[in-house]
Amino acid sequence: MVDVAQDLLSKLVVRRTAGVTCVGRIVEVEAYLAAHDSACHAYRGRTRKNRTMFGSPGKLYVYPIHARYCMNAVTQPVGVASAVLIRAVEPVAGLSTMRERRGTDRLLDLARGPARLCQALQVDRRLDGWDLTRGARIWIAGDATPSPRMRLSPRIGVTSNQSARLRFFVDRSPYVSGPRRFHSQDR
């Protein structure tokens, strides 16, 4: 599961709506584990809201937070509720559409942070359960760029299991959403 989180760095999130394609390179993620992770939405068991996490790997788990949304890639086999929160992307294509959706011209503010990212890519609960491997509407694609230097830190904004070092981000990327404090670990 942690390997999947690390492997997502530098992959592309592609979102197609109404003939417009927006693309962002993933620069920051957080892993949420099925076992012994009190910050994971599935920690207390399956509910109507988190049922996608218990589904097959490659599905998109979207949840609301503060009247916005966050998107996660489900990573484990059916019944094992683990997912990777996509925290930030570097905008690559469809910038004018992202700017319009976000209401800002500031490139760094388009998709830096999970809620901003979802707004820029027009992701909401209607996409919960979507298959990210289909290559339609929204998907994750490979990229030819070399593997980045990765950094590791505790997750951001969780109220439990705060010390878990499950946040991975691209070193020196200005598009990373949170503090760039890290613990020495390179990929």
Image (cartoon, grey):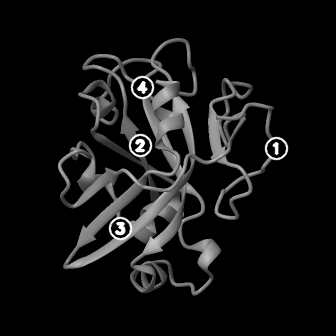
* Rendered view: 44 above or below 127: above
- Give the Cα separation between the discs numbered 2 and 1: 23 Å
Q: 65 or 181, which is in the foreground?
A: 181
Front: mark 4 or 1: 1
- Give the Cα separation between the discs numbered 4 and 1: 25 Å
Q: Position of residue 158 (x, y in %)?
A: 65, 36
Amino acid at the residue labelled 3: Gln
Amino acid at the residue labelled 2: Asn
Give the residue at mark 4: 82
* Rendered view: 168 above or below 161: below
Which numbered disc, 2 or 4, marks the residue that appears first in the sequence? 2
Give the residue at mark 1: 181
Front: mark 1 or 3: 1
Amino acid at the residue labelled 4: Ser
Q: Residues within 10 Å of mark 4 (few under 14, many from 20)?
A: many
- Give the Cα separation between the discs numbered 2 and 3: 14 Å
Q: Is residue 10 left or right of residue 109?
A: left
Q: Is residue 18 left or right of residue 116?
A: left
Q: 133 or 164, which is in the foreground?
A: 133
Which numbered disc, 2 or 3, marks the residue that appears first in the sequence? 2
Front: mark 2 or 1: 1
Amino acid at the residue labelled 1: Arg
Residue at image coords 31%, 64%:
15
Q: Position of residue 37 (x, y in %)?
A: 56, 19
Give the residue at mark 3: 122
Give the residue at mark 2: 72
